[in-house]
Image: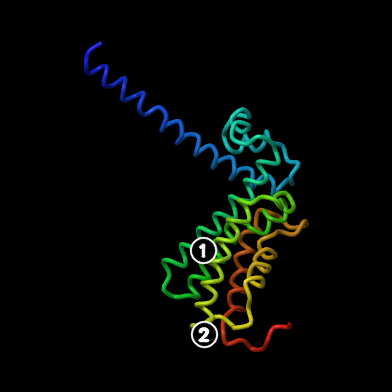
Amino acid sequence: MSSTDTARSQGARGCLAPCRRADASRNHERILTAARAVFVEDGLEASLDEVARRAGVGNATLYRHFGDREDLIRQVATHVIAQVADDAESALAEEDDPFQALRRCVEAAASHGVGAVLQVVRGQFVKDEEFFAVRARGRAAFEEIMRRARESGQLRPDVTFDDVWGMLAQLTRPLPCCDRADFDVRAGRYIELFLAGLRAPAPGELPA
């Protein structure tokens, strides 16, 4: 083998592990995204074969990434909350207008379908430290944005984080009788109405 061939062979071997890791990371993300959609549509007993099919991977790949159904459910919940936390931290760092940052957080959380996902997976991760650590990170960013919006006079002073999160959970969860196909469009209208109601000055105080 020539020195050139040897270098090419060594280069190929050197790329093999990083390439495999990149492929594995993409597959992991695809499975989580597909599982989120399938669990919302069909519940926690949904077919894992369907999850693998939508993710475009084989069953063996799915089980290589997730030990069992419970592990997949837990990771779906954590994945969604991590996305919400990342979005909130980005909005906090990048937006000069506090209410615009809050709008960005609310719209991003709605786009992840937090209400639908967490309704389906509730109770499956009550002892999971990673989930609660991620949730705490997102809450801290949300509350700091709300504090700034409140101090700027844009957010009504009697609105709490629990108000915002509770409404988000309700507005991004389709009713059993609803057609899922057009829910995202209607949810966008609900979110706009909700954001309008958050603005100061408020016409009256909220009930205790």
| Residue at the outermost top position | 1
Q: Is residue 75 above or below residue 152?
A: above
Residue at 36% in and 29% down: 15
Task: Kindly identify the residue that appears in the image at 62 percent across and 45 percent down.
Answer: 75
Residue at position x 53%, y 77% in the image: 147
Q: Which of 70 and 47 is in front in this view?
A: 70
Give the numbered dot on residue 153.
2
| Label disc, if present, on residue 88 of the rendered structure | 1
Tag 2: residue type?
A: Gly
Mark pair 2, 1: CA separation: 20 Å
Specify the quadrant that holds the N terminus: top left
Q: Which is more N-terminal, label 1 or label 2? A: 1
> Pointer 1: residues within 10 angstroms few (<14), some, or many (20+)?
many
Q: Which of 181 and 145 is in front in this view?
A: 145
Image coordinates of residue 172 in percent, x first then y, are: 66, 61
Label 1 near label 2: C-beta < 8 Å? Answer: no
In the rendered image, the quadrant that contains the C terminus is bottom right
Q: Position of residue 177 (x, y in %)?
A: 77, 57
Tally the numbered discs.
Answer: 2
| Amino acid type, residue under disc 1 in the picture | Ala
Quarter of the image holding residue 44? top right
Q: Where is residue 29 in the image (x, y as percent from the top left)?
A: 54, 42
Horizontally, is 140 left or right of 67 in the view?
A: left
Image coordinates of residue 94 in percent, x first then y, are: 41, 66
